[in-house]
Image (spheres, helix red, strand yellow):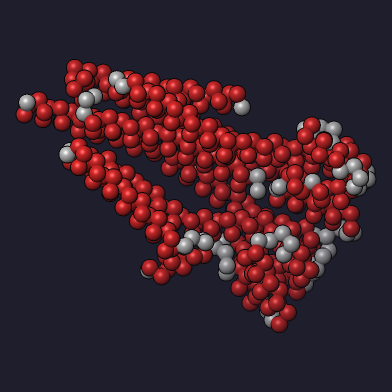
Amino acid sequence: MVVDYFIYCLISLLAGVASFYLTDNLYFLIFTFLIYLLSFIAFEVILKRKARIHREHHKDLTIFIHDLFLPYSANVSLEESIAYANKNVSMRLQEEIKLLDEFKGEEKLDRLTNYFHSSLYSLFLKTIHLCETSSGEKIQTISFLLEENNRYIFQNKTFQKNAWRSLCEFALLWIVSFLILIIIRFAINSYFSAIVQAWFYLFGIGIYFFFFLLSVHLFMYVTYQGEKNNEQ
Amino acid sequence: MNNNIKTKLAKANVNYKRALIVTLSINVALITVMIVTYIFTNNHLFFIPYLFLIVLIDAICFYRFFSSYQHHLEMKSKEVTNLFRYLYLDLNNQIKVKLALINLKERASLKMVELLDQLINETNDDSSLTPYIKFASNFSSTLVEEVMLALFRYQIESSPTKLKQFNEAYFKLKRVVELEEEKTNKRQYDFIKTTAIIGTAMIVVLVIIATVIVVEEYIHG
């Protein structure tokens, strides 16, 4: 999280410095820096924090499912399997399970629905219910859920890989855009002081930086939505 | 054509009138600011960035409206594929088709429950394939029809072969929906990457216009 805030400050500072370089206007630097930083903080508070918690819970879920079914598929009781799965999960989940000590087996798992909020967990509960109540193939039922669990992990990894690749391409394109800007700034150096007085030029630069901010937020939002869709 | 758009937006839970009012309000606000800016600066070149903003915002609004229906279809396909997981589990644990369909209602959204209710009620009166095909017609993917056909066959003859056919149809649908999701995500990122190119074009046009203004002022003193 500290790294995120550092990156927000860095991007805001770079945008501010770039706007100052292009306008020779200190107010532009301060205004750009503040607008960028406040918008990133707003995004962090409104969406990213929620996404971070959701991601941690989902990671817990995949570990919990995997570790529970290891003993459970070998005909160990559900209660003992839950105790075994509890060892490798986060402290937060361990505390949550500890609060449910009075409940046993399926009932305990039912009450964890509020913690996980995921369709995978819903499928997990259904699988447990079928294993406990029906006379069908336990191994086939469990292996389907484990496949789904692995699919979530794999899909998430693929999504992260694609997101990183897209981020590199996105960053590169905007770096090229800023480089062109700097080159143009050098090219018009002889009459730059005249151009910078024109309201139209300042207004246009403002629109450009606003557009850049919008573009970055759009990227962050699509990434957030993609992660959310994967985990549902 | 207008009615077709309205129907599609209604299915995607987008209020057509409200959407138009919001778009028009944004356009009116931008035009007002544009006129006020012109009055204060007396420079007609200010129209260019405002017109650019109006075109951009209108494009985003219309893209959002038209893609909301597509998004709605994709979400429906995803929902039904997720629901079929429970159907798969039930059928492979020797639970009857009718009971398995009733069990699905616990996990479904309100709209999906309506469709399931319709399917279950119709199968009580009609033992043909029709109710299953009618259910499948609510989804854009033809693979949902394949799954429902396999389900119907399994209901007629509850053999391991028919169950295996259902399983195969379901896994095929699942894979296609996953691939569609990956493509949608890639498309969204590609669209965002083009904004950098648009930004560069903006700045080049801006500098050219600013240079023309300066030269014009120099020539006219």
> In the shown orientation, is residue A78 left or right of residue A59?
right
Q: x, y (%) of residue B158?
A: 79, 69
Residue that appears at 48% across and 34% down = A39
Residue that appears at 84% across and 56% down = A130
Residue that appears at 40% across and 55% down = B22
Residue that appears at 60% across and 23% down = A2
Task: Decide which of B9, B83 is in the foreground and name it.
Answer: B9
- Whether residue B173 is visible here, answered yes or no, is no
Task: Decide which of B27, B14 is in the foreground and name it.
Answer: B27
**Quarter location, residue B40:** top left
Say if B216 sits above or below B98 in the image. above
- Whether residue A219 is visible here, answered yes or no, is yes
**Quarter location, residue B216:** top left
Say if B213 sits above or below A225 in the image. above
Q: x, y (%) of residue B46?
A: 23, 39
Say if B126 sits above or below B116 in the image. below
Quadrant occupied by the C terminus of chain B: top left
In the rendered image, the residue lying farthest to the left is B220
In the rendered image, the residue lying farthest to the bottom is B125
Q: x, y (%) of residue A143?
A: 79, 48
Task: Decide which of A14, A120 is in the foreground and name it.
Answer: A14
> In the shown orientation, is residue B157 left or right of residue A71?
left
Q: x, y (%) of residue B7?
A: 46, 68
Quadrant occupied by the N terminus of chain B: bottom left
Count of marks, rendered view: 0
Say if A143 sits above or below B72 in the image. above
